[in-house]
Amino acid sequence: MLENLIINHYETAAVLLFGIGFTTLLLHQNLIKKIIGMNIMDTAVYLFLAAKGFVTGRLSPIVVNGVQDMEAYINPVPAGLVLTGIVVSVSVTALMLSLSLCLYRRYHSLDLDIILMRVKKEWR
């Protein structure tokens, strides 16, 4: 069991990072900490995809010296997914931070319990 964890150390690190991010997302009430937790989870997914897409001994999918054998190159799809995910993650993070800023300006807090309490007072 431990031997498999050591051999697959990138995947193990990705699972641990995802768990840390998920725990941060669930247990903290501060919006900034939740955003950080979500970014840690994103990073874990990118690490996992990159680890699964890498094959030792293969080259980047750029034809060099006329070698066109598929077995000589890695699959470019995981790298494309990681790049696309990073772009989406940056956009989502920017949106979450801007919405957090709007909430802070209105309710003068980033604590979800305090914000919820103040919203309930407004609706009464």
Image (cartoon, grey):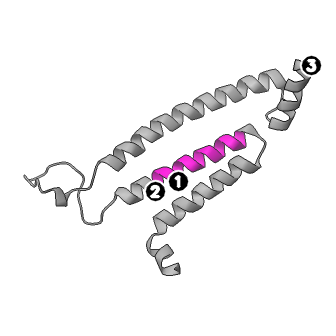
Quadrant in the picture for the C terminus: top right
Which residue is labeled 3 in the image?
124
The image quarter containing residue 54 is: bottom left
User: Which residues fall within the magenta stretch?
Assistant: 32-48
Nearest the camera: 101 or 53?
Answer: 53
In this rendered view, identify the residue nearer to me: 101 or 123: 123
Q: Are marks 3 and 1 in contact (CB under 8 Å)?
A: no
Instruction: Please give left or right for residue 4 compared with residue 75 in the image.
Output: right
**Residue at image location 35% in from the left, 56% down from the top:** 53
Three-letter code for the amino acid on which mark 1 is drawn: Ala
Mark earlier in primary sequence (3, 1): 1
Residue under pointer 1: 44
- How crowded pointer 1 is (Cα within 10 Å; few <14, some 14-19, many 20+) is rated as many
Do the CB atoms of the residues marked 2 and 3 lie less than 8 Å apart? no
Relative placement, left or right, of 3 versus 75 is: right
Q: Is residue 93 above or below residue 118?
A: below
Q: Residues within 10 Å of mark 2 (few under 14, many from 20)?
A: many
**Residue 43 falls within the magenta-colored stretch:** yes
Residue appearing at x 40%, y 41% in the figure: 83
**Which residue is tagged 2?**
48
The amino acid pointed to by label 3 is Arg
Q: Position of residue 75 (x, y in %)?
A: 27, 52
User: What amino acid does circle 2 point to?
Assistant: Phe
